[in-house]
Amino acid sequence: MSRARSRGWVRPIWTARKSSSCGPMPRLAYAVLAVGTFAFYGSLAWTPWDNPSWGEDIAWVDLGKLEGVDSLRITGGEVFLETDDAGKRRLVFRCTDPQGNGTIAFPAGDGAKDLSGFRFVAAALRNTGNEPLRVQLSARATAPKGRSLSRSYELQPGEEVLLRLTLRRTVPESLSGVFFGMRGFPALMDPERGIDVSRIIEVSVGLRGARGGSGLIIEGIEAREPFQPPDCLSGDRSGLFPLIDSFGQYRHADWVGKTKSVEDLRSQLALEFEELEKYPGPGNWNQYGGWTAGPQLEATGHFRVEKYGDRWWLVDPAGRLFWSHGVDCVRVFEAITPLDDRRHWFEELPEKDSPLGQFYGRASWAPHGYYQNKGTYETYCFFGANLFRKYGEEWRTRFAELTHRRLRSWGLNTIGNWSDPAIYHLGKTPYVVTANTRGPRIEGSSGYWGKFPDPFAEEFDFTLKRDLDRHRATSAQDPWCLGFFVDNELSWGDEFSLAIAALQSPPEQPAKKAFLEYLRSRYDSIDRLNAAWGTKYDSWEALRMSTEAPDRTKAAEDLGTFYTQIAEEYFRRCREAVKSVAPAKLYLGCRFAWGNPRATRAAAKYCDVVSFNRYDITLRQFRLPEGLDCPVIVGEFHFGALDRGMFHTGLQETADQQDRAEAYRRYVLSGLSHPTIVGTHWFQLTDQATTGRGDGENYQIGFLDVCDRPYGELVAASRWIGEQMYVIRAGSASK
């Protein structure tokens, strides 16, 4: 991958100054900020190692003075110290581990090093091999014990990169309890992931899954970009609150694109209209976003899935090949944040009887975090309020119409999950719909989002069909609708977990009754079951009343068989419910975040398309279980950065907006190159609230910020994908 930069792009230059409250006030200035389509030549945004504009950096290890490699901790490989043609010292790391995993760790030496005055630790890396190389940059401190920071990246053959890892830090005792209801805090504080950056004891570079002969050159490791710790970190909280301005933005920092007034909101719109006129959308798309230059297949009037050549595709209603390049949560009510116990955080909340008072609300959803089990709480929707300020009384209509123009211009042809029917029913952009199972859960189960639905319960069919019936006269008949997801990120566990959960449930649990029925059909007496499992049940009734788990090894065959029955019953009944309401629509599965081969095989048996929420840096290593060949759609992925006033990067970290755009481009390209993947949907259209939603998520993951301003870097990457994706998918363009 070439290091050449895109045309029309100049790296932002940072300076930082001290704030009187919580957070440095970075001033970000672009010599050029082009928001149109970029010509990508290799890496769009990765900083070259020799960038001179960052002020004083410090070397973690001085390779010029390193006499040998004995001071390094090396596993799974061999390391050589060499001098290049320019006389510069560098390390060469060759992985020898059969699994392709190796690490070279650079200890701090005596004691620990204080990196609290920096935003990043960075490694200059080069892949000398002929295969992509997954690397991981990590930093470890004295505390918290067992916790480290890490970031992964996939180096292409010949690529060299400066990989930056954000130095997320622990919350000092002086601020304990001050911030809550958020997963990320200001000033790089991270209560869940942060480490004591004043006492870093080791920085390491690891290889994961490297193939034989893979080589990595390390040209240096440094602490980069000065960070001035704010007063609040040392205990002075006098200027800390209010924390958030009237637009929902962080008060104590400035950045390019920050909204300062209502006039800023409105003036930006005129500039955006000019851009949308200039870039109306890809020229090789039909009205649905299908490929007009591709083959003409049968036009059925609805979306379907088909294997064309050696790869899977969606086919649009007009019979054109279609790859779903989409975005989730296309809706007006976003950036909704709880107010209870922290109204003093907000600079200016409107009167409830004012026009902006309509954006107050109440909620109770809080599966995790501060507001969990606290009943209902008051909320405010900053995004909706900013749309009202920007578009006036017709804000909903104007935003809906503009959204379709934006998506087309940005190269996006699908409105993803959890979106607003008032937007997607306009018939201008294809979309997906979601439905949910209700009724009894398997009581012995557990999971991040709750217990697993019991597919043997009578209520399963009725409640799901009732939810789907809402769409019978609309989306079920609409040619713009791709299909239906049912549920999201269920906790499938391992290949035995749901069967064990059934046994650990109360005696009247439908899944438990079904399991006992299976066991009775296999074992003609409880004694035979006891002999097989090594148990001592007195009777079948004793087993029904028991909530103890059997020995996993001895009961493995039955546990695995019944797990498959649970999974197949779930997907079969979901499919039947979807097809009873919308027979012409695709059943898109359950959006696996956690799964296993048994669950995936059951999904492939009944789903038209199997869906995964895949938060990774690439899809290159995604594999279905051996022997499966079916279409797959990615329902969620994202990347975030902390350079525009937000407090948390989301599930995949990047260093800044250019870095985020390049990560997006690489991820979607890996999907386009994958023969089974028929689409990727980004989560989500808008940044989450700076101060967090009900469960505390406050991620910088939008195409839009809270003030409805597009992130130009991400838009440019998405637009480029939209222009190129069909020739790339068809294999007629360089990847």
Image: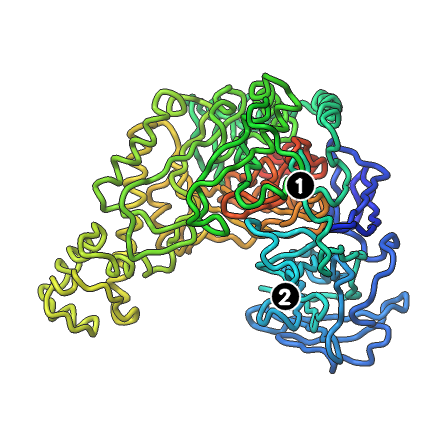
Q: Residue at x 59, y 72 (%)?
A: 145
First-in-chain label (1 vs 2): 2
Residue 538 x %, y %:
11, 70
Residue 83 in the image: state x and y as whole percent: 85, 71
Quadrant of the image containing the C terminus = top right
Query: 10 Å neighbourhood of mark 2: few (<14), some, or many (≥20)?
Result: many
Say whether residue 67 is left or right of residue 679: right
69 vs 248, left or right, is right
Give the vertical position of 397 relative to 671 (above or below). Answer: above
Whether residue 643 is visible, yes or no, is yes
Of the residues tagged 1 and 2, which is closer to the observer? 1
- The residue that disc 1 covers is 244
Q: Residue at x 34, y 24 (%)?
A: 472
* The quadrant where residue 7 appears: top right
Camera sees residue 1: no
Q: Secondary structure at mark 2?
A: strand
The colour scheme is rainbow
The circle on residue 207 is 2
Estimate the spatial distance between the alpha carbons at disc 1 and disc 2, rounded to whole Å.
41 Å
